[in-house]
Image: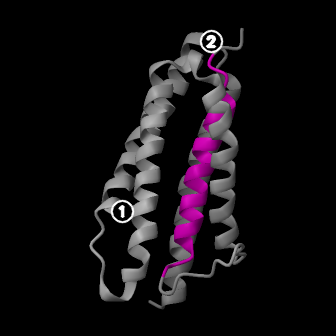
Amino acid sequence: MSEASDSTKATVKTAILWGGLLLLVVAAGVTISDETTRRLGLRTLLALLVVVEILLAFPQMFHEPRTEDAAAVGPMQDAGFYNLAMALFFALCAARPEESTVALAAAIPLYAIHAGTHLLRYAGLYYGGEAPIPGRPRHLDLRAGLQLTVALAAMVLFYPPSRG
């Protein structure tokens, strides 16, 4: 199988998986009106984000550089500490979502910018002096962008934790 064919398959698989999850999140956000269930939905999302951010943080923070990527170690470790900070942020919001409305309102545009950046990279659009990473498959930016979009949609649809 060719590299282009593998990339196309990975892109389609990514789009179907995360597109399906996005549809489920939107359907749940639109149809669930019970305040207790909405609050539970928001707390569940925030708890999942804690786990994801931690899973992303530690491999990046303790990355063992190879010779070809030694220059990327600093930014990669910075990204790991960012993920760890986001895990703590989401844990605090999950503990008391009703008292975290301002913090969650700030997280929504940040996640939109982060998701948008990955989706722009997937589309081949770079800004701020950024360039493609040699050897990095494009579908990884699609996957990251769609993962962030699903989380973003859930935050928007289940925020604020109480509609009252």
Q: Nearer the viewer, residue 98 or 147?
A: 98
Q: Which residue is mark 2?
A: 34
Q: Quadrant of residue 61?
A: bottom left
Q: Mark 1 vs mark 2: which is more N-terminal?
A: 2
Question: Could you tell whether 67 is left or right of 88 in the image?
Answer: left
Q: Amino acid at mark 1?
A: Gln
Q: Residue at x 47, y 86 (%)?
A: 135
Q: Would you place residue 18 above or below residue 123 in this image?
A: above
Main SS of the magenta part reads helix
Helix, strand or loop status at disc 2: loop
Q: Which residue is mark 1?
A: 60
Region of the chain picked out in magenta, as a range: 136-161
Q: Is residue 41 visible?
A: yes
Is disc 1 surrounded by few (<14), some (14 to 19) or many (20+) residues within 10 Å?
some
Is disc 2 surrounded by few (<14), some (14 to 19) or many (20+) residues within 10 Å?
few
The quarter in which the C terminus is drawn is: top right
Q: Is residue 26 visible?
A: no
The quarter in which the N terminus is drawn is: bottom left
The residue furthest top is 164
Q: Would you place residue 112 above or below residue 100 in this image?
A: below
Question: Could you tell whether 121 is left or right of 133 in the image?
Answer: right
Question: Could you tell whether 75 is left or right of 157 in the image?
Answer: left
**Label placed on residue 130:** none
Q: Quadrant of residue 129?
A: bottom right
Helix, strand or loop status at disc 1: helix
- Residue 12 is situated, as x and y percent measured from the top left of the image, at 58, 68
Q: Amino acid at mark 2?
A: Asp
- Residue 17 is situated, as x and y percent measured from the top left of the image, at 53, 55
Q: Residue at x 57, y 76 (%)?
A: 138
Rendered image coloring scheme: one colour
Q: Nearer the viewer, residue 56 or 5?
A: 56
